[in-house]
Image: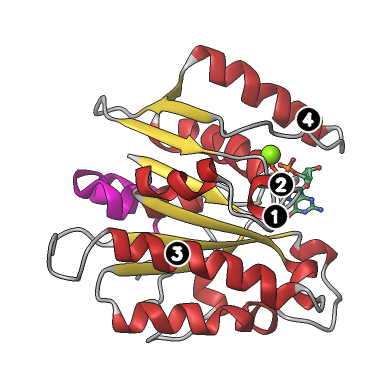
Amino acid sequence: MRILFLGRSRVGKTSVIARGLAELTLLLGSRTTVDDRVRLGRVRRAVDRGRPPRPTRGLPVYRTRLRDRTWLDCADHDGRLLERSAADERMLAAPSMAEALVLTVDAPSLTRVSASSDVARLAVVVRRWIHERGPSGTEPSRLLPVVLAITHMDQLDKNKTLEEVVALFDPLRAVGATSSRITGLTVSVNAGSPSGHCALPLLWGLRHGIPAMANEVTAVWPVGPLPAWSWGSNGFDRKRATWHP
Ligand SMILES: Nc1nc2c(ncn2[C@@H]2O[C@H](COP(=O)(O)OP(=O)(O)O)[C@@H](O)[C@H]2O)c(=O)[nH]1
Ligand SMILES: [Mg+2]
């Protein structure tokens, strides 16, 4: 399956993919292809030294083979392609190839005045993606996984909470309430920290995108009920959205 990480430049997409796939290797015994492992290793080493990785160019895809011999593709992109005022053709096409979306957003940016237009931009992509997948009921057994991955929580004003900054996404979550096809998760991830839980967006995608993986994922993600909120209906529960293995 293919998981598309969507977000502006420097929000942490590439580092979350690099750290997330490394965590997935430990959790599920997956194996990233050699070239991609080398590229992602470079990203992780830069982040470990407190340096930003090289900016992403184009729309690279990182391939990982799961134990059952299926593939997990993580699609990354140059954040500037999303920021352009005129839609980029490649960015328009990217979601149609994805079975799961990870909306990657840095928390401090959600407190800026420009935040609502950034959120609206992501919402357009998600709505179009749901629309392309067809009306509910066409593939009843398959829920579309969407993760709101919030980065840079460590740099957020201490008076602000995760609940407050993700409130801008409420209209998008309401879309989920009217579509029985989406299953959403909000998590904070931090690629710069060993306990940053960067595998969670990937596990969420695998659990819902590959039904045969559900048990294996649940086995390595041993919280009682999965920290899920049905998109728009259960509301957001901070405690359950953070992972305490
Ligand atoms: N402080 C902090 N830095 C982060 C976090 N997540 C990512 N970063 C850093 O953000 C920078 C930009 O990351 P990058 O992966 O290149 O962003 P991209 O442009 O979205 O791919 C890197 O230096 C990362 O180490 C986080 O949660 N907290
Ligand atoms: Mg990048």
Q: Please tell me whether mark 1 or mark 4 is closer to you in this view.
A: 1
Q: Start and end of the magenta stretch?
A: 206-222
Q: Amino acid at mark 3?
A: Val
Residue 216 lies, in percent from the top left, at 28, 44
Mark with earlier residue (3, 4): 4
Mark 4, ligand 1, within 8 Å: the answer is yes
Label 2 CB-ligand 1 distance < 8 A:
no
What amino acid does circle 1 point to? Answer: Glu
**SS for callout 1:** helix
Pick the front one: 21 or 55: 55
Disc 4 versus disc 2: distance between alpha carbons? 14 Å
Was residue 76 drawn as part of the magenta stretch in this picture? Answer: no
Spatial CA distance of label 1 from label 2 is 5 Å
Q: CA distance from mark 1 to mark 4?
A: 18 Å
Q: Nearer the viewer, residue 236 or 63?
A: 63
Residue shown at the point (46%, 67%) measured from the top left: 185
Give the residue at mark 4: 54
Cβ–Cβ under 8 Å for marks 2 and 3: no
